[in-house]
Image (tube, rainbow, N blue to C red):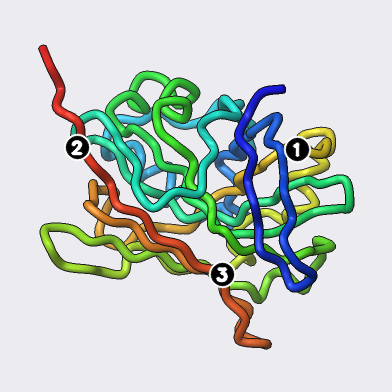
Amino acid sequence: MSGRVLNFTTPAGTVTVQVRDCVVAGWTGRDKAALDHHIEELAAIGVPGPSTVPLYYRVAAEQVQQGDTVQVLGRDSSGEVEPVLIATEDGLLLTVGSDHTDRKVESYSIAVSKQMCPKVLATAAWPVEPGPWMDRLTLESRATIDGREVVYQTGTFAMIRPLAELVEGYGGLQPGTVMLCGTVPVSGGIRHADRFAMRLTDPESGAAVEHAYSIETLPEIR
């Protein structure tokens, strides 16, 4: 049995999940202009556009973690706040996560770049039944860059294709599957940070799920 064992705190108690599969849904923007903006963001750092949208990238289950520190090679990677669905025997959980990605590698292979870095998830989650109500949920990330914390991303689920549509497009989620569901635009361009904080909020109830992690850069030996 592969993958990590993750524990999520939910309103009903702790849920333990053996991760068997991880899939990253990419190019999931609901609005064409916003999607084009994200494609332009990546094109600015040399990343080619998609062959179709959305795309589903497979990542090793062992890359999914809930730590507060990740180690990456060099300073060419960055975090990306995303809603995350976790399929369990009792239904779906929703949490917030980061599709941390090596941008240098992404310039020649998005699929390989997804595999290069950990996918960091929060330790709290909500049981959910995807539906239109989810459009009100908000996403925010804050990045510490050169010693200063800045707002890096903000947006709502209404900017992303409905999560039920993403699940259906993948053919459903078997228990033990983690799906990262796409991101929202970056303010100021994609760049490396020393710390990445992310937050998922329901503005109607005030409930939130948040997590943060530090990025330790390993030297590139030539």
Q: Is residue 58 above or below residue 159?
A: above
Q: Is residue 81 left or right of residue 145?
A: right
Mark 2 or 3, closer to the camera? 3
Q: Quadrant of residue 209?
A: bottom right
Q: Is residue 31 left or right of residue 168?
A: left
Q: Is residue 76 above or below residue 124?
A: above
Q: Which mark is residue 197?
A: none
In this view, the residue farthest toward the top is 222
CB atoms of marks 3 and 1 within 8 Å:
no
Question: What is the quadrant of the N terminus in the image?
Answer: top right
Residue 219 visible somewhere in the drawing:
yes
The alpha-carbon separation of the residues under discs 2 and 3 comes to 27 Å
Give x and y (percent) for residue 178: 67, 41
The alpha-carbon separation of the residues under discs 1 and 2 comes to 32 Å
Image point (10%, 12%), residue name: 222
The residue beneath circle 2 is: 75
Q: Which mark is residue 209?
A: 3
Per the image, label 1 sits on a secondary structure element best described as loop
Per the image, label 2 sits on a secondary structure element best described as loop
Image point (36%, 30%), residue name: 47
Give x and y (percent) for residue 188: 25, 60
The alpha-carbon separation of the residues under discs 3 and 1 comes to 21 Å
Give x and y (percent) for residue 122: 54, 57
Image point (66%, 23%), residue name: 2
Q: Quadrant of residue 175?
A: top right
157 and 143: which is toward the camera: 143
Name which residue type carries label 2. Answer: Arg
The residue beneath circle 1 is: 176
Name which residue type carries label 3. Answer: Val
Q: Residues within 10 Å of mark 2 (few under 14, many from 20)?
A: some
